[in-house]
Image (cartoon, rainbow, N blue to C red):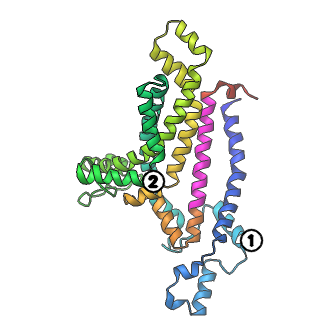
Amino acid sequence: MPLYQFILRRILFVIPLLIGITLVAFLIANAVPADPINANLPQSQLNNPEIVEAFRREWGLDKSPVEQYLTYLGNILRGNLGRSIKTRQPIADDIGRFLPATIELATAGTLAGVTIGITLGVVSAVWYNRPVDFAARTVSLVGVSVPVFVLALLGLVIFHAQLRWVAGPGRLSARIASPPEVTGFMTVDALLAGQWTTFGDAISHLILPATVLGLYISGIIARVTRSSMLEVLGQDYMRTARSKGLHERVVILRHAFRNALMPVVTVIGLSYGNLLAGAVLTESIFAWPGIGRYMFRASTSQDFPAIMGVSILIATIYVVVNLVVDILYYFLDPRIRTAR
């Protein structure tokens, strides 16, 4: 099957899925018993029927649910996610302001998690039932079991407050000027502006939250890598490769690891999508101005347009990540390329 045909099939499946997601997001947001009027109008204005009615008209609350959904769907198709009740700004602008910070953190965290998890998984499988295996399994178990907020608080206390190895919460220190915004990624913008001091400070702030998220996802990546590697190492073609006199490093990396990648890529994709969806606790603890904090504030203020906008964003992220994983399958598994 040609690559373009493979991608086209996946995209055609994605379109009705995204429309269904908008319906689910709308139904969930409207099923919440909380009243956005009580959450967003001052107490002194709640007793004024004219103000309450004006608020309902402004935000379309006076229409039937069907009319609200059709209006909302039409706006989405035009690229309009609506306006936040809380910030009074277009939701697309709010997301564009907060999302780059989350992408930067999630990407760094995923790179850390993939490095730690794959290393532990491969080492654990190669030295199966040896002390190294037990040590690697213990580390991965800690990563899976310990809550992320515990890792975050321990990291702040030990590596920031006590040892002073890394910077604390935030994306930059108070004394450091922000670089001109080009991409929204602090490290990239600092490099583009040639501000090396700002770049170093941004990296110092990024290390700890990224490592916390990396440890959080490395446990499951390590366990899946170990399981997949053990299954591949027991196959007949592995004994054939060794019988040809190939070096053990070539056998492990070229033959075993490559064939064990399919489930590992799936887990990495889902983990990255999960971090992009907004690591609320991590962003809150490290005062990271990302989409997770924005989503939390929207939820606490019953900002329904913002909640639905972020929900659709998260669903789209998962859909896109799964599409990318499917495309990687195309290159990793020859059987997909020869299928009809």
**Is 147 situated above or below 50?**
above
Is disc 1 placed on a helix, strand or loop? helix
Q: Amino acid at mark 1?
A: Val
Query: Which corner quadrant holds the C terminus?
Result: top right
Q: Is residue 335 magenta?
A: no
Q: Which mark is residue 102?
A: 2
Secondary structure mainly formed by the magenta segment: helix
What residue is shown at x 26% (from left), y 61% (from top)? 174
Instruction: Say which quarter of the image contains residue 3.
Output: top right
What residue is shown at x 69% (from left), y 72% (from top)? 68
Residue 36 in the image: x percent, y percent? 58, 77
Instruction: Say which quarter of the image contains residue 22.
Output: bottom right
Residue at mark 1: 66
Looking at the image, which is closer to me, 175 or 168?
168
Is residue 246 visible in the rendered image? The answer is yes
| Residue positioned most to the top | 244
Q: Is residue 316 magenta?
A: yes
**Is 128 situated above or below 151?**
above
Badge 2: few (under 14), some or many (20 or more) residues near its Cα, within 10 Å? many
Q: Which residues are magenta?
A: 310-331
Query: Which corner quadrant holds the N terminus?
Result: top right
Residue 212 in the image: x percent, y percent? 40, 48
Left or right: where does residue 7 sit relative to residue 249?
A: right
What residue is shown at x 59% (from left), y 25% (from top)? 231
What is the distance, in whole Å, between disc 2 and disc 1 at their CAs? Answer: 34 Å
